[in-house]
Amino acid sequence: MAQRSPVPTRICPDCDGFPAVAIDTGSLLEDGTRATLKVTCRRCHGTGTTRTAAPAPVVQREHA
């Protein structure tokens, strides 16, 4: 019996599939741990994937 293959997801071109990163600020907190910032990708909003592009509309032209 044939099985359907899942629709391939498109990896985000901005983050290459790594949507969230922790950036070290270089400073230490009072308990001695490093202060970090969690940053997510603006394009995919932290999912790592984007939607596939919609098909271009078909333009009908009249032949003269």
Image (cartoon, rainbow, N blue to C red):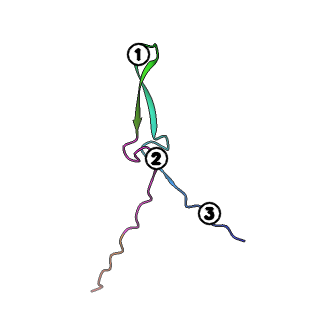
Q: Position of residue 54 (x, y in %)?
A: 40, 64
Specify the quadrant that holds the C terminus.
Answer: bottom left
Q: Is residue 13 above or below residue 56?
A: above
In whole angstroms, how far apart are the C-alphas of marks 2 and 3? 21 Å
Of the 4 image quadrants, the one containing the N terminus is: bottom right
Task: Give above or below for 48 relative to 30.
Answer: below
Q: Residue 46: x percent and y percent?
A: 43, 43
Q: Image point 45% across, 30% down: which residue?
A: 22
Please provide the residue range marked out in magenta: 41-56
Q: Main secondary structure of the magenta part?
A: loop
Element on which disc 2 rests:
loop
| Helix, strand or loop status at disc 3 | loop
Q: Where's residue 30, x and y in %?
A: 41, 13
Q: State if disc 2 and disc 1 touch (CB < 8 Å).
A: no
Q: Amino acid at mark 3?
A: Ser
**What residue sits right under mark 2 in the picture?**
47
Q: Nearer the viewer, residue 46 or 60?
A: 46
Which element carries disc 1, helix, strand or loop? loop
Q: Quadrant of residue 20?
A: top left
* Residue matched to label 3: 5
- Marks 2 & 3, CB-CB < 8 Å contact: no
Question: Residue at point 45% right, 33% down?
Answer: 21
Q: How far apart are labels 1 and 2 at the CA level?
A: 29 Å
Residue type at the position of mark 1? Leu
Q: Amino acid at mark 2?
A: Thr
Q: Whole-Å distance between the Cαs marked 3 and 1?
A: 49 Å
Location of mark 1 (residue): 29
